[in-house]
Image: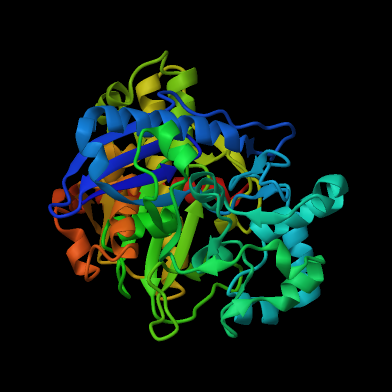
């Protein structure tokens, strides 16, 4: 059996098809080749049109199927991974009522802070394991207050992956892990939080029926199958937010294991079997994809909004259309510490690990007689690595202490400078694997439809493709640069 995985990001939609038995990737494609537009009508806002997601999904799948030829008819299950914490609202005809308010939009910060105060910090942290913060529930509260006509027409409020599953199957549902990432979930009672729903004035019927991440939520519609060039009736058997799914793709499913990503945003995600929380909600706890009533599996997530987007911004505005490979090579030619140049990457909305404050990006120590654009590239990549170190120190306070960080060979992890800086400043080895979110979603689909008889069986073909160990000779330079970086952050 072949397995199709879809990974809906904020930059692009990627699709991959793997051979279920060997785990080998047979075809992969993404769309658009550049990056999807993020609509920012006001400072701190970030929206995308769900129909643009769907258009790019069709292109990515179409390119995969073209590579497969007649083997496309062997696809037996579909899995969906998606950008977390977004809000999609539809009416009774499943029509989208407004653009999606996506993960990095910070307009709802005040709503979450007020909810924390009104419901009570003790209740929120002990039951929700998080502040309502800037998550999906608070975004829905913003719509309720500011767009009452839209809110009155809402039939269901969904996450981005729920919308993609709806388009594929015609069925509206969500997942338990999805409810937890939206901060709708009461971890103590194991159900949707009535206290939160009542506080915001939401009817329970606004939320779709929830199902396990590994389960069949519907079959591919005939009309959609014809449009995509696939057989009808293929089950959609897995759904998860991008970070829980990234952890799955790296076989991070047991307590003590840690995964990381560094795309537009940066994330460290650790699995635990303890209900832990940070008193300041700088890191967040969600149900992991393999959580059950009998097996506690929670994911502790550190998110850095401003990560790879800084690298992308420099490429567009400073790099003169140079490739990321060229940028990485230029950065390698500069010594650790970037000759005193420091960059804070926090220019992509409110940062949870900075207590939901918008700090913005900052360049410090720029000397026109010393620094070149190569210094800017290196300082940016070091600054992103330093933000990971800053966040990892927070995670250690709630018991996440990795010996190894697992990551896919993609995005910022393609940069030797970034890997070396991150490994050296944290004292942690980095293991890279031949996988990504779309391949993880494909493996998840195989688990969800019952093709794989165990989780272990799903990871055939997953191999280590690179290891970066801490460089003790360069560590002193990174530590000196990190102290300057922290000082810069502290004065903002």
Closer to the camera in the image, 268 or 449: 449
Left or right of 465 in this view: 301: right
Where does residue 66 sit, x and y in percent of width and height? 27, 27
Where does residue 208 sit, x and y in percent of width and height? 62, 62
* Residue 353 versus residue 10 in the image, above or below: below
Closer to the camera in the image, 213 or 74: 74
Quadrant hosting residue 449: bottom left
Query: Which residue is at the far top?
Result: 320
* Residue 174 versus residue 373 in the image, above or below: below
Residue 418 seen by the camera? yes
Q: Residue at x 42, y 79 (%)?
A: 292
Q: How many labels does the image show?
A: 0
Q: Residue at x 25, y 66 (%)?
A: 403
Quadrant hosting residue 102: top right
Colouring scheme applied when the structure was drawn:
rainbow
Q: Residue at x 33, y 58 (%)?
A: 444
Left or right of 349 in this view: 445: left
Q: Residue at x 62, y 34 (%)?
A: 49
Residue 13 seen by the camera? no
Closer to the camera in the image, 418 or 247: 247
Left or right of 53 in this view: 308: left
Where does residue 177 sit, x and y in percent of width and height? 50, 66
* Residue 98 versus residue 200 in the image, above or below: above
Where does residue 50 sit, x and y in percent of width and height? 59, 38
Quadrant hosting residue 38: top right
């Amino acid at each position: 059996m072949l397995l199709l995985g879809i990974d809906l990001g904020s930059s692009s939609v990627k699709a991959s098809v793997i051979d279920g038995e060997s785990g080998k990737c047979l075809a992969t494609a993404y769309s658009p080749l550049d990056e999807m537009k993020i609509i920012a009508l006001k400072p701190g806002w970030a929206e995308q049109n769900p129909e643009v997601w769907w258009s790019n999904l069709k292109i990515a799948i179409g390119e995969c199927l073209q590579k497969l030829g007649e083997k496309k008819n062997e696809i037996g299950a579909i899995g969906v991974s998606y950008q977390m914490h977004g809000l999609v609202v539809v009416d009774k005809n499943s029509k989208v009522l407004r653009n999606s308010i996506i993960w990095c939009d910070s307009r709802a910060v005040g709503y979450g802070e007020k909810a924390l105060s009104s419901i009570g910090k003790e209740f929120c942290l002990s039951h929700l394991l998080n502040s309502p913060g800037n998550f999906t529930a608070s975004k829905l509260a913003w719509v309720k207050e500011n767009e009452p006509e839209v809110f009155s027409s809402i039939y269901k409020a969904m996450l981005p992956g729920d919308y993609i599953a709806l388009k594929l199957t015609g069925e509206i549902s969500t997942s338990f892990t999805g409810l937890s990432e939206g901060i709708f979930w009461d971890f103590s009672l194991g159900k949707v939080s009535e206290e939160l729903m009542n506080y915001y004035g939401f009817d329970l019927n606004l939320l779709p029926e929830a199902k396990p991440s590994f389960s069949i939520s519907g079959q591919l519609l005939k009309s959609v199958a014809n449009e995509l060039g696939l057989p009808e009736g293929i089950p959609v058997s897995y759904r998860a937010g991008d970070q829980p799914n990234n952890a799955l793709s790296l076989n991070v499913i047991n307590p003590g294991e840690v995964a990381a990503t560094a795309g537009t945003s940066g994330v460290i995600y650790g699995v635990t079997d303890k209900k832990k929380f940070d008193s300041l909600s700088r890191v967040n706890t969600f149900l992991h994809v393999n959580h059950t009533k009998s097996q506690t599996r929670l994911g502790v997530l550190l998110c850095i909004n401003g990560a790879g987007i800084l690298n992308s911004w420099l490429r567009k505005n400073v790099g003169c259309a140079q490739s990321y490979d060229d940028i990485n090579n230029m950065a390698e030619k500069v010594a650790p510490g970037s000759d005193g140049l420091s960059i804070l990457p926090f220019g992509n909305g409110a940062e949870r690990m900075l207590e939901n404050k918008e700090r913005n990006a900052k360049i410090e120590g720029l000397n026109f007689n010393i620094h070149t654009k190569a210094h800017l590239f290196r300082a940016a990549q070091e600054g992103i690595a330093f933000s990971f170190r800053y966040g990892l120190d927070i995670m250690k306070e709630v018991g996440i202490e990795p010996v190894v960080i697992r990551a896919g060979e993609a995005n910022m992890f393609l940069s030797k400078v970034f890997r070396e800086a991150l490994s050296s400043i944290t004292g942690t080895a980095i293991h890279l694997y031949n996988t990504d979110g779309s391949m993880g979603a494909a493996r998840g689909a195989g688990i969800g439809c019952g093709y794989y008889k165990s989780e272990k069986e799903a990871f055939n073909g997953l191999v280590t493709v690179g290891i970066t160990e801490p460089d003790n000779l360069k560590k002193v330079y990174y530590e000196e640069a990190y102290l300057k970086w922290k000082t810069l952050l502290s004065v903002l």
